[in-house]
Amino acid sequence: MTDGTVGTTGAGGGGEPESQESLRLFGEVVKSFRKRSGLTQEAFAPLVGYSVPTVASIEQGRRFPPSDFVSKAETLLDAFGAIKGAARHLSRRRGLARWFHQWAQMEQTALSLYTYECRLVPGLLQTPEYARTLFANQLPPLGDDQVEAQQSARMERQLLLRDRPNTAYSFIVEEHVLLRQLGGPGGARHLLDHLIEMADLRNIELQVMPLVKHHHAGLDGPLQLLETPENRWYAYSEGQENGQLISDPKVVSMLQMRYARMRSQALSLEESSSLLQRMRGAP
């Protein structure tokens, strides 16, 4: 399954979920120190650089805390190492595959994140219905609790798009992916509505690679590129039941070159938006 979502559970341990109890305990630690400091969630949220709903979700044990949240909360609340200590027990992201953990953690603080996808709508842009269709029809079949965990993990990751307005997100998606109508006509229309809404955000650029294109630079497959706060670039490539984090500067540079060429080969932002509107049709 693309975007690092757990496909199966088994001897390899890739599908072992994060303990909900450990998330709740971490949230209680943060809440206790926040109250000890005399801060409301509304006052605390801007200090750590996250929204009030995000802080509430972390304190309620419903969201995995980003690494920068942990370090900022520890410092701001003068927590004697308790918050960092509690975070060390959260080594796994519920609903995410083992091979995707490191990339998912890097996403939390990325300055730039570029994604080219030719198989499915990128996970960060999927609607709940789209994601659920993928998980519910996965082989071998998943249990209801696994489907819920995976959908929850995907929706949680999407909070990045709004929680980090200063991160530059670029997406290039093949037109045929949008024509597939995964989940049926109703789900496809909802997906297009969602993509149009996301493309209107200032920090998101969405381009469509046209269906008829004699050649383009992404024919070797999907790729993701990420810039860290230290301005170092990494790449990520994922297949079936595996993913590869790429740190070799020469390889990353080559993939950056390919992505830059794809940006010029895909429809412009305005043309892509117009295409989505036409595909959406009348309300």
Image (cartoon, rainbow, N blue to C red):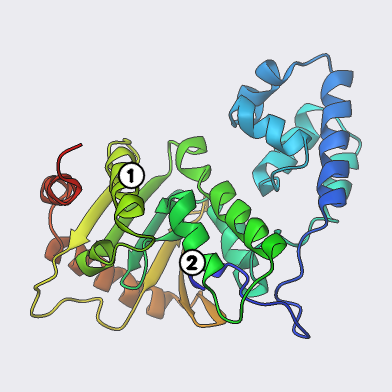
Identify which residue, 54 or 102, lies in the foreground: 54
Q: Quadrant of the C terminus?
A: top left
Q: Are there few (<14), some (14-19), or many (20+) residues within 10 Å of tag 1?
A: some
Asked if the residue at tag 2 contacts the one at tag 1, i.e. Cβ–Cβ closer than 8 Å, the answer is: no
Q: Position of residue 219 (x, y in %)?
A: 25, 81
210 displayed left or right of 143: left
- Is residue 200 something that shows in the picture? yes
The numbered dot on residue 65 is none
Q: Position of residue 230 (x, y in %)?
A: 52, 53
The number of numbered discs placed on residues in the rendered structure image is: 2
The numbered dot on residue 134 is 2
Q: Position of residue 248 (x, y in %)?
A: 47, 78
- Please name the residue shown 51% across and 55% down the image: 228
Within the image, what quadrant is residue 49 found in? top right
Image: 11 above or below 183: below
Amino acid at the residue labelled 1: Ile
Identify which residue, 261 or 278, lies in the foreground: 278
Amino acid at the residue labelled 2: Leu
Q: Nearer the viewer, mark 1 or mark 2?
A: 2
Q: Position of residue 140 (x, y in %)?
A: 61, 82
Image: 120 above or below 43: below
User: Residues under labels 1 and 2: Cα distance?
Assistant: 24 Å
- Is residue 109 something that shows in the picture? no
- Please name the residue shown 15% across and 39% down the image: 282
77 displayed left or right of 229: right
- Please give the residue where the numbered disc 1 appears in the rendered image: 204
